[in-house]
Every structure is written in C-alpha cells, then in structure tokens.
Image (cartoon, rainbow, N blue to C red):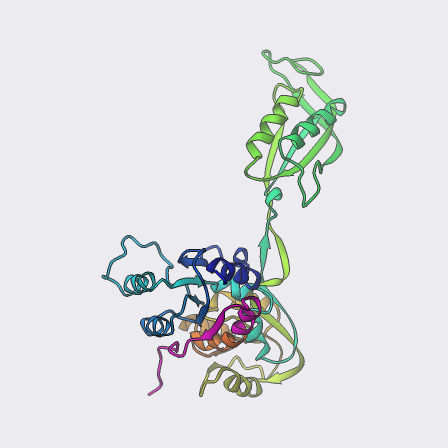
Amino acid sequence: MSTVNDLCQAMERIAPTGHAADWDNVGLLVGQRTAPCAKIMLTIDLTREVLTEAVSNDVDAVVAYHPLIFEPLKRLDDSSEISRILLGLISAGISVYSPHTALDASPDGMTDWLASNLGDGESMPLEHVLVRRPGEANKVVTYVPPEKLEAVRMAMASAGAGVIGDYTHCSTAIENQGTFYGGDSTSPASGEAGKLQHVTEQRLMMVCSEEVLASVIAALRSAHPYEEPPIHVIPLAGHPIQDSGMGRALRLSKPRSTGDIVAKLKSALGVDHLRVADGGVDSHDVVACCPGAGGSLVDAARAAGATLFLTGEMRHHDVLAARASGMTIVLAGHTNTERGYLPTLRDRVASLMTDSDVMISGSDRTPWSVH
C-alpha cells in the first residue's frame, strides 16, 4: 500500500520543493510519512468545507495548493479557524502536502498551464529558479608560490573543496604577480622584511560547500607556506534553470488581439467575466502571466517585451502604473488562475501513485460571488 512518503516523493518529482520561493512554506505540513495513503484529495484552499468533505470520503491525504500553515503558530487550540482545521485533520488522521510556488515554478506546472490558455508559442520564465549544487556554495581563492601549489591544492581537496558533481579535486590555477611589504616582526617565506617584494605566485581557486568551508580554510592555512596566506571567500550565485521559475513570458506564434485573448481565457478558466485595464495596444506579440497575485512580476514581463499580463489580482495603483506604461492587465480572480490546473495535477499524481485513488474536492471554490 502507498504511504504518505510515497506521495511526498511523487510531489517532489512533479514540483521540486527547491524550486519554491524562499518565503514560501511547501512540502508535508501535517502527517506522518509512514501513514497509509490510499485516497488523496486535491484542493486549492483547505477550508472547513473541504475538511468536512475529506473526512466524509475517508481521505488519507490532502494536497492543498495554498499552504494551510504559512506563518508560525504559537498555539494549536480552537481559538482560530486555521487551528480548528488543523485539529480536525489530526483527529481524522489526514495528512496535508502543499506545493504552492514549487508547482508554479516547475515545468508543466500551474504557470505553464495558465500560459497555454493565452495562445500557442514559445514561453520562458520571467524569473528563473536559481540552484546551487551543494559543493558550489563558495569559491575559495588563495595565492601560492608555484612550488607549493600542489601541496595546498591537495590539502584543500582532502578537506572537501573542489567537488563539482561527481568530480573531485577540481581547481583552477593562474600565474599571478603579487607584492608585499613585511613589517619588522614578520618572517616572510620568500624575500625579506622591510622591503617591498615582488613575487611570482599561482592564483588557486576551488569551490566548496558551506559545510566544509571552515575545514577547507584550516587545511589551506596548514599547507600554505606564508605567515599570512591571502584568502578570499566568494559566495557564488545559483545557476538558472532554463525551464523553471516564476511567471511566464509567451511569444505568440501569431499576434492576437486583446478581445481574442479575453474570449479564450473566459472559456478556458470557466469565468463569466474578466477585469481588463487596456494599455492601448491593439495586437500582442508577447504576453505574460502569473497565477495568483503576480503584480511583482509586471516589470519583468515588460522587460521580456510583453504588452499584456494575466494574473489573478493586483494592487490598484500597480494596475494604473502598468496601464500607463502601455501594458494591458487582465485580472481573473486569484484562484480562477489556479483551480483549472487541478485536473492535470490529478492525472500526474495518479500516474505516480497507482495504488491510490486521487480525487478533486467538490467543495473547493472561490470565496467571491458576483451580485
């Protein structure tokens, strides 16, 4: 029988938690990994109505797109709605997994689905996911006399530096001209104190992880002949993943009017109306989108050449500023840009959890109504 841990592994394949925004709270939020997982329910929001539905259907786990636990809880009692839902989940033995922005960022995830409703074309993330491999968090740089280069390199490698993927002892050495002036109390390894010295050195560079950084520095100092070895520790940025990240810019295979795009969106998202702030461009070659609340990505969309931006909700003054810049804003309502992906997610989870029944909540819906 499948377990909650199997569900966690399946979701990690669909939406790696490392792709989530650093402010988010994703992964297994409630439950035991060893618990059985024969029935799974998908929802956007885990409300009291969804909880009641899950209990009545003997559900073992809920995949709730929005995290039920977002900010730290100081107590777990019946004084708040979130706590009451959590107590109900624990009482019923129901686990909860939330993918949220990890699912937004991942290939074939929620954002790619939303972008596909804008038309056909080639898309790319507005903000790429940056990934640092464990051994490449820092670059350690030192300057070594040529005859001591190998000793220092091997000492640093033995301490864990120079690991890139399945390769070890990776380094770069470049000839370098250095200078130093030793004070009266110094005893230079080459040259003499009290005079400006010019030396030929090798600039040695190796990557290392945060975990072994202190050991690498200690090994470097131990093997280095200088009294004061020059050491630079440079934090390294992550590598962008080409097809993963927040938002999407879509270069349409053929230009489309705002009216055509809006008509298709209403049908695809299952809504009766959309809010449109017309930026004055009649035909669009590049469009962009972000599920939920995507106002922070408007500038990135503009930089990508987009003249229309679709999201769920935005602040009023951000809409005004975007429209003034020539960007047409289309707002569909927060969860209306998300809920339509659940059938796709159901199929993806079911294909990986073949021993489990996967269903979509019938109680999950937008809190808004039109009067």
Residue 213 in the image, given as x and y percentages of width and height: 57, 34
Q: Which residue lies furthest to the front in this view?
A: 1
The residue located at (37%, 60%) in the rendering is: 69
Residue 244 in the image, given as x and y percentages of width and height: 60, 62
| Location of residue 61 by image quarter | bottom left
Q: Tell me the magenta residue range.
A: 345-371
Residue 362 colored in magenta in the image: yes
Residue 23 colored in magenta in the image: no
Residue 264 in the image, given as x and y percentages of width and height: 55, 86
Residue 266 in the image, given as x and y percentages of width and height: 50, 85
Q: Which residue lies furthest to the left in this view?
A: 79
Question: Left or right: 86 with respect to 118?
Answer: left
User: Does 50 sit above or below residue 73?
Assistant: below
User: Does 88 sit above or below residue 281?
Assistant: above
| Location of residue 222 by image quarter | top right
| Location of residue 45 by image quarter | bottom left
User: Does 128 sit above or below residue 312?
Assistant: above
The residue located at (46%, 60%) in the rendering is: 4
